[in-house]
Image (cartoon, rainbow, N blue to C red):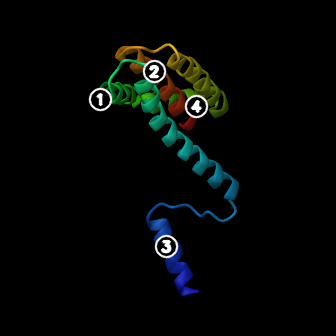
Amino acid sequence: MGSTLEHETIWQKFGIPRLKGNGKFVSASLIDSLGTGLIMAFTVVYFVRTTDVSLTAVGAAMTVARLLALPTSMVVGPLIDRFSARRTAAWGNLVSVPGYLGFLLAESVWQIVVVVFLVQVGHTSYWT
């Protein structure tokens, strides 16, 4: 029993929540995290293959877009308090729509920055 208590203390020390009884949530989070990580990698490949923009420029454009989207959580937090988490998450998903559709039209660095920025704002709004 002492080792179990010590084990829980170690998990708590590192901020890892208890997983027992939360299997569906943990599974959904793992799938979403994997998908999010893969979509960014595939986005790089997509823009390199569908535009004349170099790999370096695509990477730089996506980095700039993500940096520009960093303050999103600070903006979205008060919106959640005012309009509810569900409504704010839905609006975040709606912001992502023109971003993803814009992938089909993006041909230059600045366009890649704009569409990736929209996707990042939407994604961050959802998870905030």
Three-letter amino acid code at the position of disc 4: Asp
Mark 4 or mark 3, earlier in chain: 3
Report how far apart the C-alphas of labels 1 and 4 lie in the structure: 40 Å
User: Pointer 1: what residue?
Assistant: 56
| In the image, residue 88 above or below residue 15 | above
Quadrant containing the N terminus in the rendered view: bottom right
User: Pointer 3: what residue?
Assistant: 9
Report how far apart the C-alphas of labels 4 and 3 lie in the structure: 33 Å
> Please, what secondary structure does the residue beneath circle 1 have?
helix
Image marks 3 and 1: residues in contact by CB distance under 8 Å: no
Q: Nearer the viewer, mark 4 or mark 3?
A: 3
Asked if residue 74 shows in the view, the reply is no
Residue 50 badge: 2
> Please, what secondary structure does the residue beneath circle 2 have?
helix
Q: Nearer the viewer, mark 2 or mark 4?
A: 2
Residue 81 badge: 4
How far across and how far down the image is residue 98, in percent? 56, 17
Q: Nearer the viewer, mark 1 or mark 4?
A: 1
Report how far apart the C-alphas of labels 2 and 4 lie in the structure: 41 Å
Mark 2 or mark 1, earlier in chain: 2
